[in-house]
Amino acid sequence: MAQSLITVDAGNLLFKNALPGLSGPDNTPAFIAAHGIVRAYKAMSYDAVAISSSDLSAGFDFFQQTSDDSFPWVSANVYDENAHLLFSPHIIKKLQSLTIGIIGLTGGGVHNIEQFVITDWRKALRSEITLLKKSCDTLVVLSNLTELENNEIQKDFNEIDIIVSGDKKGANVQPQVSHNSLLVQSGGRGKYIGKLDIVRHGQGDWLVVSSQSLEYQKNKLSSINLQLSQLENQQSKTGNDFSQRIARLKLSRQMLSDQIA
């Protein structure tokens, strides 16, 4: 099966790397660090990076410069003083026959840059869904909203398939299914990179299988195959009847194979 990769970040990019005083009187070291983070993300070919309210403290000029340098910032609800959308609200990514719409949502919070206005994410998300659902097979939200707000998305926006959370109060979150969507989050401060493997089988509900449990099932299947081989050889050589044990093992093998598939 061909594999494809999308690399995203749900925000708090600058916050989680502990950049104090981005807008303070002596902010040169912080800006050097912030530009270094952006260069590192570009080197890793990130497809989309959401923006948190804390990130906005880097200032208008910083985001203008990095946007001009083609850094993939996404936010559907950050405007300037004149009600102009400042960033791309979404990015569309094509993977083989699959078209994926990636929407950025900025959470409310404290920032000290008057040029940025954070509007209601609900209205912005509804507009993006209306725009993208006709052309995209899968909709992903990069959210640095709160846990309660992410739960609201899962409950009230059934068109969203995946939520990648950047809640700075959260840690690693194993995939969680609620309603029609899957929510994931990796730990903050740049210490973790989360990898989510998805196998698409058309329409249907999410089925979450951890890599540990899948590895356990595969090891158990190998053990059953070995037992079957030994019993069948022993039965052939000695003439002893192991047919009932062989039948039970074959049934277990079939059930495991179905679960793995």
Image (cartoon, rainbow, N blue to C red):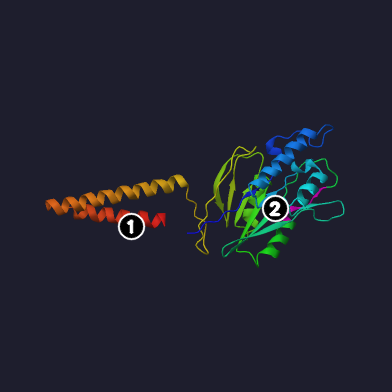
Residue 16: give x, y in percent of width and height: 68, 38
| Left or right of 217, for residue 122 | right
Q: Name the residue under label 1.
A: 254
Residue 54: give x, y in percent of width and height: 75, 41
- Asked whether the viewer can see residue 12, the reply is no
The image shows residue 25, relative to residue 216, as above or below, that is above
| Left or right of 108, for residue 211 | left
In the rendered image, the quadrant that contains the C terminus is bottom left
Magenta extent: 116-122
| Left or right of 188, for residue 119 | right
Q: Does the magenta stretch include residue 199?
A: no
- Asked whether the viewer can see residue 125, the reply is yes
Q: Which of 249 and 20 is in front in this view?
A: 20
Q: Spatial distance from mark 2 to mark 1, Cα to Cα?
A: 43 Å
| Residue 37, numbered label | none
Q: Residue at x 85, y 47 (%)?
A: 115
Q: Mark 2 points at which residue?
A: 104
